[in-house]
């Protein structure tokens, strides 16, 4: 099974990715960990594309789970190759409180799905991303385009209840 998980920051993409990758026994790639270098520096896009491309090539015969949107990092290829695309479109306040809870849990630490040397943070820039910039019209348009282009394999979840229902459905299917 090849699963692409996209959506808003704080929705729980990485947690869901780990859970599904473990269930299916496939590798997981967290695009936040690909995008960042130690100290929250950004990796060169060409290097990101190479890392993601190599991951897709190495796992083309098996399955994978990739979490993160990153439109300019082989998004079309990821969507085309995916058997299932999950859009996690939780409300902004839910994402804010989930991200804050995550910050409290990992404050001063590096999350398992984060890049090495990137301690968890919850600063003004990230808060603005959670509440405003990450929900700009152009980002919403990306999700609408994905739903229209890949209708047959897109599942949209907007709450934890919907996510739990989807996970139960996916994990009850025979492997």
Image (spheres, rainbow, N blue to C red):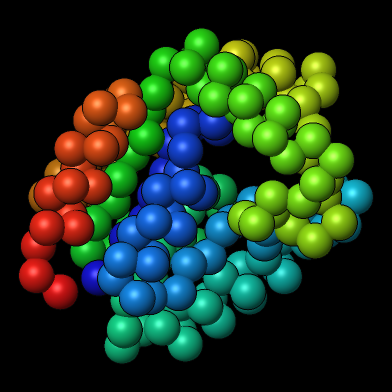
Residue 169 drawn above or below residue 74 = above
Which residue is at 80% across, 61% downward? 116
- Whole-percent x and y of residue 85? 28, 51
- Give the side of residue 121 with respect to residue 83, left or right: right
Query: Residue 22, image x and y in percent?
Result: 38, 67
User: Number of numbered discs present?
Assistant: 0
Q: Residue at x 17, y 55 (%)?
A: 170
**Residue farthest front in this picture:** 105
Q: Residue at x 25, y 37 (%)?
A: 164
Q: Is residue 62 above or below residue 111?
A: below
- Identify the image quadrant of residue 60: bottom left
- Residue closest to the eye, 170 or 42: 170
> Residue 50's image quarter?
bottom right
Q: Residue at x 18, y 47 (%)?
A: 168
* Residue 12 screen position, x and y as percent: 47, 38
**Residue 3, image quadrant:** bottom left
Quadrant of the snapshot with the N terminus: bottom left
Name the quadrant of the C terminus: bottom left
Say whether residue 88 is visible. Answer: yes
Q: Position of residue 144 (x, y in %)?
A: 31, 31
Q: Is residue 79 above or below residue 11?
A: below
Residue 80 visible? The answer is no
| Side of 49 relative to 46 (left or right) | left
Q: Residue furthest right?
A: 39
């Amino acid at each position: 099974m090849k699963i692409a998980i996209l959506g808003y920051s704080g929705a729980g993409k990485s947690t869901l990715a780990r859970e599904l990758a473990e269930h299916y026994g496939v590798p997981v790639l967290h695009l936040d960990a690909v995008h960042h270098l130690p100290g929250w520096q950004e990796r060169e896009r060409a290097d990101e594309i190479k890392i993601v491309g190599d991951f897709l090539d190495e796992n083309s015969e098996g399955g994978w789970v990739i979490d993160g949107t990153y439109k300019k990092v082989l998004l079309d290829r990821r969507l085309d190759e995916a058997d299932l695309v999950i859009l996690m479109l939780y409300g902004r306040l839910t994402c804010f409180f989930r991200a804050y809870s995550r910050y409290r849990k990992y404050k001063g630490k590096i999350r398992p799905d984060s890049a090495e040397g990137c301690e968890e943070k919850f600063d003004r820039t990230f808060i603005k991303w959670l509440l405003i910039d990450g929900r700009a019209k152009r980002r919403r348009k990306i999700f609408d385009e994905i739903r229209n282009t890949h209708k047959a394999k897109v599942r949209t979840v907007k709450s934890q209840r919907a996510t739990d229902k989807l996970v139960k459905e996916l994990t009850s299917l025979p492997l």
